[in-house]
Image (cartoon, rainbow, N blue to C red):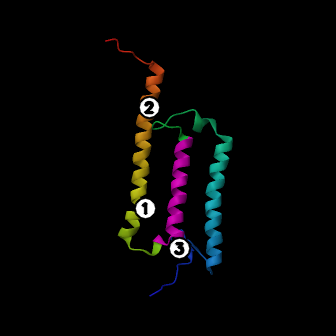
């Protein structure tokens, strides 16, 4: 019942001869994304830090997106989701993505409320 694991990444763009070569290819891909994240965190370009897009700095959005890309690729390759049924893959991958987006929405709305309360100041009610 066992089947061979596919020795390719990026939908067949890169093909490897062995599992060891594939693991090194995936390691290099994930290391490049991590290096980009670290470099952006150290350099913090002004155009990504000084503006606001959808309630957050663009640099934070880049970190979130790159982290989701890494998480998706790890699940896709190392958890062998590529070889599973299409609907199982979608249920495993899309559920956390929607939950993360929902959590980000809640944090942004509640954080904005708390920021406004501290900015305007507290009000005391006299009865």
Residue name at image x 54 percent, y 64 percent: 74
What mark, if any, has residue 125 been given in the picture?
Answer: none
Mark 3 secondary-structure assignment: loop
Q: Residue 78: give x, y in percent of width and height.
A: 54, 70
**Is 5 displayed left or right of 46 in the figure?**
left
Q: CA distance from mark 3 to mark 1?
A: 20 Å
Q: Earlier in the sequence, mark 2 or mark 1?
A: 1
Which residue is at 46% across, 36% downward? Answer: 55
Which numbered dot is residue 112?
2
The residue beneath circle 1 is 93
Mark 1 neighbour density, 10 Å: few (under 14) some (14–19) many (20 or more): some
Which residue lies most toward the bottom here? Answer: 1
Distance of label 2 from label 1 (alpha carbons): 29 Å
Q: Quadrant of residue 84?
A: bottom left
Q: Which residues are magenta?
A: 59-81
x and y percent of residue 70 in the render?
55, 59
Give the mark toward the camera: 3 or 1: 1
Q: Residue at x 40, y 59 (%)?
A: 94
* Residue hosting label 3: 12
Is 45 in front, or is 127? 127
Residue at the front extreme, as displayed: 127
Q: Residues within 10 Å of mark 2 (few under 14, many from 20)?
A: few
Q: Is residue 16 above or below residue 58?
A: below
At mark 1, the secondary structure is helix
The N terminus: image quadrant: bottom left
């Amino acid at each position: 019942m066992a089947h061979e694991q596919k020795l390719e990444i990026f939908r067949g763009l890169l093909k490897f001869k062995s599992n060891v070569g594939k693991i090194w290819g995936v390691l290099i891909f994930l290391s490049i994304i991590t290096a980009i994240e670290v470099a952006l965190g150290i350099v913090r370009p002004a155009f990504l830090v000084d503006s606001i897009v959808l309630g957050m700095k663009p640099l934070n959005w880049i970190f979130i997106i790159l982290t989701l890309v890494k998480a998706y690729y790890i699940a896709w390759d190392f958890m062998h989701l590529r070889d599973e049924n299409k609907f199982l893959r979608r249920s495993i991958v899309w559920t956390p993505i929607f939950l993360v987006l929902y959590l980000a929405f809640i944090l942004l709305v509640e954080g904005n409320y708390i920021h406004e309360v501290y900015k305007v100041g507290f009000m005391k009610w006299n009865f």
